[in-house]
């Protein structure tokens, strides 16, 4: 003990000397002046005292006031200055990986150190930290994962949970666990940070913890609603060009098809009516829903383009931030803008995108300064709402929509409805324009629609399936899942919890008594959705690892096939070239990836992606995820050192199909052939439709009786994204108990696969399965 103590004391002194040297250096002084200008600085002493005196405090303050970059740093600095630097260990969680990374980078540069020294970060499958790291920014998921193996957070002195106002599932989950831990860790300090002012909710949850507000300063921002925007830009609502396109393009089979051309006028009328400000409240919920669904889409890209032109031509200098719903929209709009004579001219407009799956190199671009007379335009998802602050924004364009998943517990279906944001979000988006000077915000919806927005967004815990979460709760060994979740800030519906438990039982990760199986234990450690984790395990057991690895990586990144609005048909054709009649979107991704690797070797990957409508960026992300997953599986002893052995059966298509089925089950739909068309029915008798660029959407008939799919999403109708055709026998063997016609022995067989883990003779095991299959078929 005392030797260690001495070592740490000596290190603390060294840390203090280094910190003082930096603060006295010219660059350090300059940086300090900059930091002192942030509103949080005025509260520094008050904050430090409150943290020292209370186990839990809640801090609220305007976005950009310096909560994330400054307050954990104040604690670090004061610990170092008082000679306890080496004894402290501060963790600050972020809801998104990109903010954890960019904040850590920022804080370490504010301290004049390289990233990974005193300040580091850790996000899923990636990190920069070392033995000298005393302030760690990580995602809330990482801290949860750490809690699995380290129930008491040994050695941690301070935990900051940031952006709690977003009410992310992981944050709500963390708060339950931490609240439970606090009595056993009297010395641990918990600091909750939030942007908006619903601090009492959190303070009450922690028995009336003190709250501190950091007053911020922002310049006034003028709000323009749709009515003003239309007048300003001269844009005519009747020029719903995009709907015309949807109507004419027969290949366009996604949800947009649900707006036939004749409904165009109806929607125009709806929107015009809404603009009359009189009657939004009087609409029936159904009409409101369709308005919410279609209004932003209809006026969508063309209106945004018109607003951007207006800003570039008529407005004062200043960067523009456009809030969009997701990566797909962002990349489509970017393509459209690039073709525009003014907005696409790099000498006049610097176009930047900002979304959750950006590469690290791209992240810094967000903070880049545009050259003189060039206007910076950032297209962003709602992550630019609070977790990342871009300082030079003067204009905000707010489409009013966010793609959030909601969860329909009754039908056990996640819904991806393009839904309106909350009033709190709209205010937050508007506020982003007033950081450096008075700003302007263009809301692309009528004022009366804004007034009907919900005040706050529903917490994520109440709107997502709980599968992963319940698996993690089980491995925390905190007792019954239901009891645990009922201690949440706002507990989820019992039905949603039961659905998750049933699912985990079905995939064999919980046994009948809700205890973790071996498979369950392993899956809880894998940083992917349990069903994809299971697919990886199966792929390694059955020695067809490579294709399965690509499929799982693809499913956890996103589809590498692009679907540009104006070239949907060409893109669809390009994708179908990868399907080689095997009726599988998943196999198409495998082929696309392999082709890309070949093309890369020949130095022609750029042309390859361009020709085949593939996103090089997504393929790159899949590539690095593949490496990381195989590392984890190798580490767990599931992979052979010899790559050939792991892939002995990779060429066996039906086996790969079976593994896909084993992972995605119970995501199955039966293929019903009619004279000229096909329809698809899920287990619960629901109808589903195929996404437009699924390879299976192109066939007149499908030679398999079943399609397995990864995701079922409700967007007006229920759609399935990626699907793979499978045969009866595969479904019987690799599906689960829900399968009609097959009951007994199924779960047992699934468990049996786990015994094959170490079986040296996989050929033998394959034969065993074939025999089982034959027996079943004879019955
Ligand atoms: P809060 O957490 O209260 O929203 P932050 O601590 O994130 O505020 O940000 C404080 C200030 O630091 C903001 O003005 C922001 O623009 C600036 N900032 C944060 N990251 C960077 C960066 N990487 N480069 C330049 N400025 C940054
Ligand atoms: Mg912050």
Image (cartoon, helix red, strand yellow):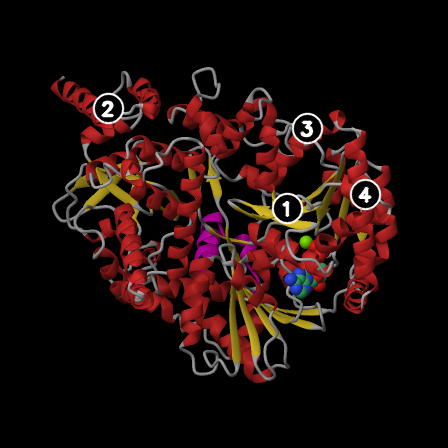
The residue where tag 3 is placed is 152
Residue 10's tag is 4
Q: Nearer the viewer, mark 3 or mark 1?
A: 1
* Secondary structure state at the residue bearing disc 2: helix
Is residue 38 at least partly visible in the picture?
Answer: yes
The residue where tag 2 is placed is 765
469 and 109: which is toward the camera = 109
| Other residues around mark 2 within 10 Å, as few (<14) / some (14–19) / many (≥20) | some
Is tag 3's residue or tag 1's residue first in the polypeptide sequence? 1
Q: Is residue 45 magenta?
A: no
| Other residues around mark 4 within 10 Å, as few (<14) / some (14–19) / many (≥20) | some
Q: Between marks 3 and 2, how big is the CA–CA gap?
A: 43 Å
Query: Which residue is at 21% across, 23% downward?
Result: 764
Quarter holding residue 772: top left
Residue 112 lies left or right of residue 765; in this view the side is right
Is tag 3's residue or tag 2's residue first in the polypeptide sequence? 3
Q: Between marks 2 and 4, how big is the CA–CA gap?
A: 59 Å
From the top left corner, tell me how far across and down residue 716 is, in percent: 39, 48
Magenta segment boundaries in residue numbering? 276-294
662 and 536: which is toward the camera = 536
């Amino acid at each position: 003990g005392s030797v260690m103590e001495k070592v740490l004391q000596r290190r603390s002194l060294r840390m203090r000397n280094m910190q003082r040297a930096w603060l006295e250096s010219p660059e350090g002084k300059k940086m300090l002046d900059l930091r002192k200008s942030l509103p949080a600085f005025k509260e520094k002493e008050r904050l430090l005292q409150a943290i020292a005196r209370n186990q839990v405090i809640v801090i609220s303050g305007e976005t950009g006031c310096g909560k994330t970059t400054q307050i954990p740093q104040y604690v670090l600095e004061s610990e170092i200055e008082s000679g306890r630097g080496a004894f402290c260990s501060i963790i600050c969680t972020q809801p998104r990986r990109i903010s954890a990374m960019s904040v850590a980078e920022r804080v370490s540069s504010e301290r004049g150190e390289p990233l990974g020294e005193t300040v580091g970060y850790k996000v899923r499958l990636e990190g920069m930290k070392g033995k000298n790291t005393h302030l760690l920014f990580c995602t809330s998921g990482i801290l949860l994962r750490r809690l699995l193996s380290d129930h008491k957070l040994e050695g941690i002195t301070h935990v900051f949970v940031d952006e709690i106002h977003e009410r992310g599932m992981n944050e709500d989950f963390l708060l339950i666990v931490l609240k439970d831990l606090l009595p056993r860790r009297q010395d641990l300090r918990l600091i909750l940070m939030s942007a908006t002012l619903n601090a009492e909710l959190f303070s009450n949850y922690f028995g009336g913890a003190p709250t501190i507000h950091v007053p911020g300063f922002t310049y006034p921002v003028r709000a323009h609603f749709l009515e003003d925007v239309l007048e300003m830009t001269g844009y005519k609502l009747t020029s719903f060009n995009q709907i015309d396109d949807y109507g004419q393009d027969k290949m366009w089979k996604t949800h947009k098809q649900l707006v036939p051309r004749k409904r165009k006028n109806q929607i125009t009328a709806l929107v015009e009516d809404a603009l009359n400000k009189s009657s939004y409240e009087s609409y029936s919920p159904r009409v409101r829903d369709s308005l919410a669904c279609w209004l932003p889409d209809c006026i969508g890209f063309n209106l945004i383009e018109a607003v951007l032109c207006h800003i570039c031509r008529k407005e004062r200098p200043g960067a523009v931030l456009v809030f969009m719903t997701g990566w797909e929209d962002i990349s489509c709009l970017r393509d459209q803008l690039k073709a525009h004579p003014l907005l696409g001219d790099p000498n006049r407009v610097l176009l930047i995108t900002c979304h959750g799956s950006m590469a690290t190199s791209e992240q810094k671009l967000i903070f880049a300064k545009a050259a003189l007379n060039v206007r910076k335009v950032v297209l962003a998802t709602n992550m630019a709402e609070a977790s990342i602050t871009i300082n030079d924004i003067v204009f905000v364009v707010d489409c009013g929509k966010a793609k959030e998943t909601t969860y329909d517990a009754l039908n056990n279906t996640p819904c991806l409805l393009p839904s309106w944001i909350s009033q709190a979000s709209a205010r937050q988006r508007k506020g982003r324009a007033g950081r450096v000077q008075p700003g302007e915000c263009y809301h692309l919806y009528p004022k009366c629609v804004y007034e009907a927005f919900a005040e706050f967004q529903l917490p994520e815990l109440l709107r997502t399936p709980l599968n992963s979460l319940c698996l993690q709760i089980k491995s925390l060994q905190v007792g019954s899942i239901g009891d645990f979740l009922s201690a949440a800030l706002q507990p989820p519906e019992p039905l949603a919890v039961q659905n998750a438990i049933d699912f985990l039982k079905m995939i064999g990760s919980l046994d009948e008594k809700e205890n973790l199986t071996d498979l369950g234990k392993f899956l809880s450690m894998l940083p992917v959705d349990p069903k994809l984790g299971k697919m990886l395990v199966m792929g390694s057991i059955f020695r067809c690892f490579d294709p399965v690895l690509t499929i799982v990586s693809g499913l956890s990144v996103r589809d590498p096939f692009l679907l540009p609005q104006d070239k949907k048909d060409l893109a669809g054709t390009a994708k179908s070239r990868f399907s080689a009649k095997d009726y599988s979107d998943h196999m198409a991704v495998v082929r696309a990836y392999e082709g890309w690797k070949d093309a890369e070797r020949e130095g022609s990957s750029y042309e390859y992606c361009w020709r085949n409508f593939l996103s090089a960026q997504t393929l790159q992300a899949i590539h690095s995820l593949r490496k990381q997953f195989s590392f984890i599986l190798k580490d767990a002893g599931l992979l052979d050192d010899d790559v050939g052995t792991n892939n002995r059966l990779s060429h066996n298509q039906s086996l790969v199909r079976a593994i896909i089925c084993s992972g995605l089950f119970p995501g199955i739909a039966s293929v019903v052939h009619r004279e000229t068309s096909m329809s698809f029915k899920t287990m619960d008798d629901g109808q589903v439709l195929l996404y437009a660029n699924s390879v299976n959407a192109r066939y007149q008939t499908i030679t398999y009786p079943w399609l397995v799919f990864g995701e079922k999403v409700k967007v007006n109708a229920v759609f399935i994204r990626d699907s793979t055709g499978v045969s009866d026998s595969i479904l019987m063997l690799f599906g689960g108990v829900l399968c009609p016609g097959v009951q007994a022995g199924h779960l047992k067989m699934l468990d049996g696969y786990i015994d094959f883990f170490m079986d040296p003779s996989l050929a033998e095991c394959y034969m065993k399965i074939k025999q089982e299959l034959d027996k079943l078929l004879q019955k």
